[in-house]
Every structure is written in C-alpha cells, then in structure tokens.
Image (spheres, coloured by chain):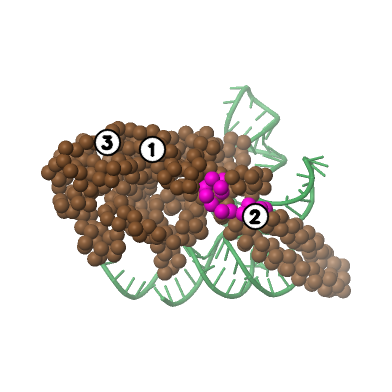
Amino acid sequence: MLDIKFIKENPELIKAAAAKKHITFDVDALLALEEKRREALTAFETIRAEQNRLSDEIPKAPDVETRTKLIEDLKPIKEEVQAKEELVKTITREWQLMMLQVPNVPDISVPEGASDEENLEYRVWGEQPTFDFPVKDHTELMEARDMVDFDRGTKVAGFRGYFLKNDAVLLQFALWQYFMQAIVAKGFAPLVVPSLVTKNTLYGTGYLPQGEEDLYKTQDDDYLAGTGEVATMSYHSDEVLSVSDLPKKYVAFSPCFRREAGSHGKDVKGLIRVHEFYKLEQVVLCEASHEASVALHEEITTNVEELLQALGLHYHIVVNCGGDLGLGQVKKYDIEVWMPSQGKFRETHSASYFHDFQTRRLNIRYKDAEGKLRYAHSLNNTLVATPSRIIPAIIENFQQADGRIKVPDVLKPYIGKDYLG
RNA sequence: GGAGGCGUGGCAGAGUGGUCGAUUGCACCUGUCUUGAAAACAGGAGUCCUCGUAAGGGGACCGUGAGUUCGAAUCUCACCGCCUCCGCCA
C-alpha cells in the first residue's frame, strides 16, 4: 500500500510504475474515488459536529420541555448522520480495495521488460563446471542412488509429491545447519515461524488479494504460506519499534506451500518445482531511508553469495525487469545457479526491497530521532530453499562419472562423508 | 466439547448512559533547585483523518464489527483473543 497523499501528488509516477510492471491500474479512477471519499467524509463530519453540539445542550436544559424539544429536534439530524456515515463506509470499502492494488514504484535502475527473459545480468561468479562424461540431471542421479522417490511421493502426496531419502536427507540437514550458523554469525536472529496463517497476515505482505490461487486454504479460512517472509514480517505488525533496534534482522525457518497454479507444464520432473519445501529466509526491517534499503539489499544478497562461493557453485545475479516485479517490490535481484543438465542458470534465491509498502499494510512503525512516527522499510531474501532449489544444483554440479556426488568441502563436517550415494 | 470471567493510552489500573480522549501511579519530556546527577516541586505530553499559510477549528479511536439511544468506554448481539474450571486426547 502506498500513501494516498503520495499518490495524489504523483499520479504520473504511479502510471509509469504500472506501465513498467506491466500491470493495469486506473490511477485516475482512484483519484476520482478519493475525491468522492473526501467530500463524503467532510459532509459527515460537518453534520456530526452539529449533532455533537446540540447533544451537549440536552443535559444542560433548564426544564423538561426544553429537553424534550431538543431531543425531538435531534431525531432528523440523527437520520442524516446515519445516512452520511453509511455513504462514507460504502465509498471507503471500495477505496480500500483499490488502494490494495496500487503498484509500488520500481527503482530507476530497474530495467524495462515484460518477463524474466528480459532480466539483466548484474554479475557472475565462477565458471561452468566441465565434465568428461555425459552429464545427468538431478532426478536421474538421485533416483539411481536412492536419494529421492517420486513414484511413492506421487502415490502418497499427489502431483509433485516426493520423498527425500538417505544421503539427500543428510545433505538437507547439513545445508540448514551450515547456512544457519553462517547467518547467525552475522547477527541475524533465528526464528521458527508459522506457515499456517490468517488471511490478514497474507494481506500484510501483499500475497492477498493478488496471488490467492497460488495459496492453499483451510476450512477455517486460514492459508498455508508460500514463504516464511509472511509470518516474519507480521511478527511486528501493529507495533512501534525503537529506532535504536533497527535494523531488525531475522532468519526464519518454515515449511513453504505453493499450489504452483498455472505452471503445470513447467519443471514437471524433479525437485525444482514442488508443492511443499523448506526455507530459511532473511527478513529485515530498517529505518525509512532509501539509502538504508539499498545498502541492506546488497548486504542480504552478499550474504548468500558468500555461501554459494564457499560451496563452489557457479552463479550469476540478475536485476529483475519491471514486468518480473511483484506489486510491492521496488527492486529485485534473482540469484541463479548454473544447472549443467539444462545448460542454463536457474533461480535459487530472490532478494527484494519494498520501502514502506508492506509495513504500511502491517502497521509497523518506529519513532525517529525527532520523535515522529514513521513506517519502517522492509526487505527479504532467501537464505536457502531445500530441497527444491539448492539440492538439484549441488547434485548436478558435483556429480562424478560413477554417479556419486562429491560433497563440497564446507559441508563435510556436517555430513561426515566425502561422497553422496 | 461444556461452564464462567476478562479485553481501557508505553505499562499498571480507575471508570456501568451526558462536562470522559478518559481519574491515578510508574515510565517519558521541559523547567526550577544542584558543580553534575538523584530527590523534591511546577508544567507538558496519545494516534489517525480533515479544514487552514498559520494560530487554531472539526471528526474518529476504550479488542473487532453491527445495534439500541438525542447521546455509548459504559447497554444488546456476533466475532476475535486471553484466563480459570470440567471433559476429551496424550
């Protein structure tokens, strides 16, 4: 959500933002509605003030007759007040729905483009691994060494179901431990957060009303979140933080559930796109400054790069183009790791900042140095998503001629062996 | 699942139909006093919206939403949350 004052003062900016994000949004309709809302509000408040003034006379009435007359006089005013208040409510409901759809303004450095195909490469690390044997994909490698079972996964859990098995399980636990220790050492506070959350919580982070079809819903009208970001952001909702506590840095662990609606034809084999996985997520709240957001955005990106480099995975970072940004995102980097079987990079991490788009919805404020209440800024980035993103990458990049998987050195202490399978 | 109780400002805690946006205490800010601090004393201070260049005016907010009333923190209903007891499960 953006500030209505900002929208009123910068309608052209919002129009440009919608165009850059390839979203249709009628700014003029919102401004017209805002005008209507303001008029209705003024009309209501004027008549309400009159009612309050006359009501105050009643207890001061010198006799019963004066009192009775005053009450009679107020009856029609009461009806007018109710009618005007009803109008305000009706308009405000419509207004709120529209306000939830206003796109946040992308940063000037965000490239133009309609889809992920137009994302720009920002930097590259490492080189493509070379193999002197035919490269296999992670599905084939893992099934051959009994590290995953998709057949039984589908039998038990349906489409995209899987069982992770044996050495792949050891690898997953090793990754959690390795990534968690590294990020805690950088001052991030670890949290295990709910995945089952209320509707309101999802509105706060902007996954509702957009994106409803990608969420699992319960019979109690709760939802299963697709990322720990949702619960973690909401952790401080309706709170006033102290400026000295900022930035707040969290690493949240949670199961993640995604319906993957509309992507039935994509990645149908393997672990890359599954309905249920686990994620360690970096979530940051900082003071309301663009410079602070930018600096922390680089920081949460670098945090991941250091770990990918330590693992020895060839990756690049892309700046997502306007059409590949979510409604609330100002700027986003996707970190993509090289997948030998596909001969291309695949997204493993996604780092975004939002300015106050999320915190305005969640009502997360802090008192600045002047004692003024301000909405904090928010950011997030994957730390590691398992098994879905990182395990296929490790399996494929470290495959050996005999089908075993070489364990990256930094993970050996957590796995206790040199090869998987 | 059954029964009862509770939800007020940063915190504690008054307030059961009108002058209550709300007594009081703690915490907070500003003065006086002090070399400085503490203590004491005096004063100040909520959030959001709206009109206004400003001074200032108006409106809303006592868990949320409806309702009764000329008027609701206070009465009624629903929902949400918390607590206690019983049952159930472990």
Q: Which mark is residue A402?
A: none
Provide the secondary structure element on which disc 1 rests.
Answer: strand
Magenta segment: does it hold A30? yes
Q: Colour of chain A?
A: brown
Among the two numbered marks 3 and 1 on one chain, the one whose residue lies closer to the N terminus: 3
Disc 3 crowd rating (10 Å Cα; few below 14, some 14-19, many 20+) is: some
Q: Nearer the viewer, residue A95 or A363?
A: A95
Provide the secondary structure element on which disc 2 rests.
Answer: helix
Judge whether A20 appears above or below A59 on screen.
Answer: above
Q: Chain of mark 1?
A: A
> For residue A51, what is the image quadrant?
bottom right
Identify residue for label 3: A128
Q: Nearer the viewer, residue A372 or A390?
A: A390
Provide the secondary structure element on which disc 3 rests.
Answer: loop
Identify residue for label 2: A30
Disc 2 crowd rating (10 Å Cα; few below 14, some 14-19, many 20+) is: many
Which residue type does callout 3 highlight? Gln
In the figure, is residue A41 to the left or right of A140? right
Rendered residue at 67%/47% (across/down) = A8
Q: Residue A117 in the image: x percent, y percent?
A: 42, 45
In the figure, is residue B69 to the left or right of A393? right
